[in-house]
Amino acid sequence: MKELNQLEKQLQERSVKELEEVVDTFLNSVAKIKEKYGGNRSYHYVDEQDTKGTMCIAPSTIKHHLLYMLKENHLESMLRHKSKELLAKLDLMS
């Protein structure tokens, strides 16, 4: 049972790392735009429901929110997919 928990933990860590790479790639592309064309160091966010106020968001905060959203929307399905892949590989080995 301990080995199963370790496998699940490794699959989760790999999945989170994959999502972090997606976010980092996106933010690096945004940084290249800023380097080339200039712009502010932070971003203004306006909630569609509350257009009276805006919020300034730093790139590190953007990274946190993007990663959180991706984990919430995709992590479980990624784990299921990676588990199925692993089981298929194990079946081939037996």
Image (tube, rainbow, N blue to C red):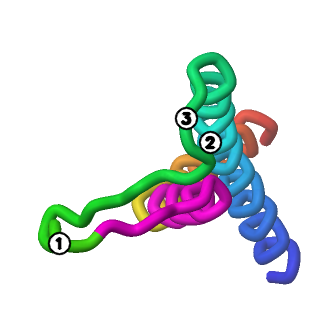
Mark positioned earlier in the residue sequence (2 or 1): 1
Q: Position of residue 44 (x, y in %)?
A: 41, 56
Q: Are marks 2 and 1 in contact (CB under 8 Å)?
A: no
Q: Which residue is located at x 64 percent, y 17 percent? A: 36
At label 3, which amino acid type do we have? Gly
Q: Which residue is located at x 17 percent, y 72 percent? A: 52
Q: In what element is the residue under mark 3?
A: loop
At label 1, which amino acid type do we have? Lys
The answer to whether residue 26 is left or right of residue 9 is left
Foreground of the two, 89 or 66: 66
- Residue topped by disc 2: 85
Q: Nearer the viewer, mark 2 or mark 1?
A: 1
- The span from disc 3 to disc 2 (Cα, nearest Å) is 44 Å
Picture disc at residue 21:
none
Q: Quadrant of residue 62?
A: bottom right
- Residue topped by disc 1: 52
Q: Position of residue 41 (x, y in %)?
A: 62, 48
At label 2, which amino acid type do we have? Glu
Q: Nearer the viewer, mark 3 or mark 2?
A: 3
Question: Which residues are drawn in magenta?
Answer: 54-70
Q: Are marks 3 and 2 in contact (CB under 8 Å)?
A: no
Q: Is 61 part of what is drawn in magenta?
A: yes
Residue 66 drawn above or below residue 39: below
